Amino acid sequence: MNTASQNFPHHLAVLRERMLHPTDYEKAVNYFLEEFAGDQEFVRMSDVDSQPHLIAVLGRVASNAIGRPVELEGALVSNLRAHGFIHGNAQVDGRIVLFFYFQEGDTGMMMLIPGVRAEGDVARFHLSGGLTDPQKN
């Protein structure tokens, strides 16, 4: 557990594979929480970044999930530049938002905790390719 920094290429490849599963996003969420979230070296190696376009897209994804316009608050965006991996957290409407994004492949995942429909809602998104409908993803 929490060993992502011991072999970033391997752990990022596993995370990406799980994120791209056509329906079961929970595997990616669980893997991120188990291998990345508590890894202090992973956090230390990531640079704080602003990423306003990413924050705007995450706001739209969260708005779609909640069913009304909302804005992210207190966003902390970190960039593991050597691996093209952006991750972070924020708050929205009294909920926690966790996210990660692979620059290569233009695909990310957002977790809304608690979710609207369950303990946690998960949505996959793209920045340049438009947003994926969280109701269908």
Image: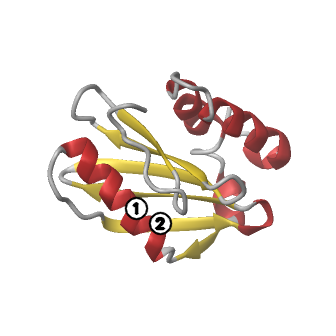
Q: Quadrant of the C terminus?
A: top left
Q: Quadrant of residue 33?
A: top right
Q: Determine the residue located farthest toward the top in the rendered image.
A: 24
Mark 1: which amino acid? Answer: Val
Q: Which residue is mark 2?
A: 54
Q: Nearer the viewer, residue 66 or 127?
A: 127
Tell me the residue that label 1 is attached to.
57
Give the residue furthest to the front: 129
Q: Is residue 70 above or below residue 123?
A: below
Q: How many marks?
A: 2
Can you say which quadrant of the picture contains the N terminus?
top right
Please state which of residues 117 and 77 is positioned toward the viewer in this rendering. Answer: 117
Give the side of residue 90 with respect to residue 118, left or right.
right
Q: Secondary structure at mark 1?
A: helix
For label 2, count other residues whose C-alpha is less than 10 Å away and answer few (under 14), some (14-19) or many (20+): some
Q: Give me the C-alpha separation between circle 1 and circle 2.
A: 5 Å
Residue 101 visible, this angle: yes
Question: Which residue is painted at 84% across and 46% down in the image?
Answer: 9
Q: Position of residue 87 (x, y in %)?
A: 56, 57
- Residue 49 pos. (x, y %): 56, 75
